[in-house]
């Protein structure tokens, strides 16, 4: 039966969910507080990476204290008096246990594989924003190579198509990188995206398919009538009613905790990008493993993206961290010295403490749903999330394998 669905948040999760819900015959109104250009979904690195590991890993737990204190660490947690941060860190530490890491990786591997299948029609529809070219993970050090071997074994075991290349074999396949790069793991299922273009295309398509998109429409409150969602209220005081609510507001989903009566333990993990104009950009997208920087060539430009900083919900640009992107990349691509910086950006990843997204029906509110908490994998997991949350809205229960992602775990 067709429902009138209101979606809050026009990032990648909101737009892909709109697309799926419209395809299933529902009526969709998407309310976006901004203009589709500022969110994590438009400024991210643009690497769709099935099999990507979660943030909480046994290895991160061992390095956490050092990272908290080291301003130059790619993962940086500036000390600040915050009870929610402290609780999040305690839960995060628990999630780094090997048994939890294994469970989370298994779920994310399966989910990202399903999501990858669902990208196929999008690849045909939006060739200007999505290319199934695969991407590389590049390393310079013996420790980096050791990491690649471990990753290759893990990914092959889980059924992903990867291959390790070293020395001349590597440089014969990837053009433009310095000889200091000693090995690379190619992720053949990877897709390279132009995130800004992808969002704008999805926004255009959802309107062409009959959906309503309202930008500059920030929701200030969700109203309920007992155990049912009733309407949303915009900052302008306008009220909009619907049969069903879906909240996909990224990290800002936490602002609706009291309206929805559910607390999702999430922290904003700030990331940065710089856009460079460059004469001969490298000919493939790559994750620079030791530097924790992603390099995504886009025509005559290159996007360098990375760093993960738990400094709360704000858009403060910390120059030192922004500059770290180009500095760290130079060791793999010295020609970057001559490149001209044309723009800078930062955005917030919505990170749960347990490393899994939070998807499904809000406990105690029969007609309200949430899909958020995708951390470093929002684009990668986008189509799978849209399918899963649309299934929930259509009354299907979450399959057993995906149950660890059910938002009901925060009941
Ligand atoms: C530097 C960086 C690099 C990344 N690289 C990758 C990558 O290579 N691959 C990958 O898969 N992922 C990557 N990510 C992660 C990915 O970008 C996020 O997981 C994803 O964008 C989250 O999408 P979202 O739709 O949940 O949230 P968002 O993109 O944050 O969108 C939420 C939207 O909700 C709107 N909103 C908020 N509050 C309200 C309100 N009250 N009313 C109306 N609208 C509201 C916001 O304006 C925003 O547009 C990266 C992130 C960063 C920061």
Image: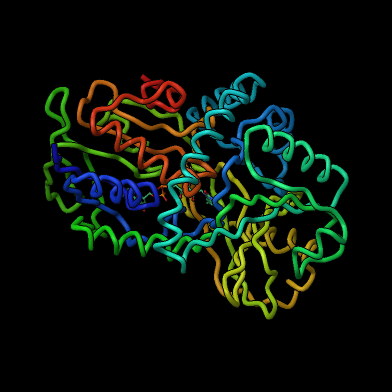
Q: Residue at x 31, y 24 (%)?
A: 397
Color theme of the render: rainbow
Q: Is residue 49 left or right of residue 5?
A: right
Vertical comparison of 381 with 132: above or below: above
Quarter of the N terminus within the rendering? top left
Vertical comparison of 366 with 188: above or below: above
Q: Nearer the viewer, residue 187 or 331?
A: 187
Residue 410, x across and y down, in percent? 40, 22
Vertical comparison of 99 with 326: above or below: above
Q: Residue at x 30, y 34 (%)?
A: 391
Q: Quadrant of residue 41?
A: bottom left
Vertical comparison of 404 with 389: above or below: above
Residue 130, x across and y down, in percent? 49, 61
Q: Is residue 101 left or right of residue 228?
A: right
How many labels, in total? Answer: 0
Residue 304, x across and y down, in percent? 63, 62
Q: Nearer the viewer, residue 166 or 86?
A: 166
Quarter of the C terminus within the rendering? top left
Residue 335, x across and y down, in percent? 77, 73
- Farthest residue, direction bottom: 279
Q: Quadrant of residue 336?
A: bottom right
Q: Residue at x 45, y 37 (%)?
A: 373
Q: Is residue 54 left or right of residue 176?
A: left
Q: Residue at x 36, y 25 (%)?
A: 398
Q: Nearer the viewer, residue 256 or 30?
A: 30
Q: Nearer the viewer, residue 337 or 160?
A: 160
């Amino acid at each position: 039966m067709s429902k009138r669905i209101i979606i809050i948040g026009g990032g990648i999760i909101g737009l892909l969910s709109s697309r799926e819900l419209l395809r299933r015959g529902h009526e969709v109104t998407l309310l976006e507080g901004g203009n589709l250009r500022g969110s994590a979904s438009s400024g991210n690195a643009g690497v769709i990476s099935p099999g990507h590991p979660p943030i909480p890993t046994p290895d991160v737990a061992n390095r956490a204290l050092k990272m908290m204190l080291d301003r130059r660490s790619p993962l940086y947690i500036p000390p600040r008096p915050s009870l929610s941060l402290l609780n999040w860190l305690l839960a995060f530490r628990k999630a780094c246990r090997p048994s939890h890491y294994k469970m989370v990786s298994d779920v994310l591997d399966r989910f990202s594989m399903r999501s990858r299948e669902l990208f196929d029609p999008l690849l045909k529809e939006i060739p200007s924003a999505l290319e199934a070219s695969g991407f590389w993970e590049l390393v310079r050090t013996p420790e980096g190579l050791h990491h690649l071997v471990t990753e290759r074994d893990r990914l092959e075991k889980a059924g992903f198509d990867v291959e390790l290349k070293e020395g001349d074999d590597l440089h014969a396949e990837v053009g433009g990188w310095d000889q200091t790069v000693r090995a690379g793991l190619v992720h053949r299922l990877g897709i390279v995206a132009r995130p800004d273009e992808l969002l704008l295309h999805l926004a255009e398509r959802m309107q062409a398919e009959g959906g309503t998109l309202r930008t500059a429409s920030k929701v200030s409150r969700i109203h309920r009538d007992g155990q049912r969602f009733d309407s949303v209220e915009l900052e302008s005081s306008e009220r909009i009613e619907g049969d069903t609510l879906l909240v996909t507001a990224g990290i800002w989903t936490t602002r609706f905790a009291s309206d929805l009566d559910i607390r999702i333990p999430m922290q904003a993990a700030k990331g940065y990008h710089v856009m460079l104009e460059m004469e001969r950009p490298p000919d493939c997208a790559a994750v620079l493993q030791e530097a924790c920087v992603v390099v995504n060539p886009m025509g005559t430009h290159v996007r360098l993206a990375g760093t993960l900083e738990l400094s709360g919900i704000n858009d403060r640009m910390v120059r030192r961290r922004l500059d770290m992107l180009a500095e760290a990349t130079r060791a793999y691509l010295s020609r970057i010295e001559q490149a001209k910086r044309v723009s800078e950006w930062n955005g917030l990843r919505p990170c749960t403490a347990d490393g899994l997204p939070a998807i499904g029906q809000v406990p105690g509110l029969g007609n309200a749903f949430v899909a958020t908490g995708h951390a470093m994998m929002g684009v990668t997991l986008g189509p799978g999330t849209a399918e899963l949350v649309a299934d929930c809205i259509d009354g299907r229960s979450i399959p057993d394998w995906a149950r660890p992602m059910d938002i009901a775990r925060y009941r």
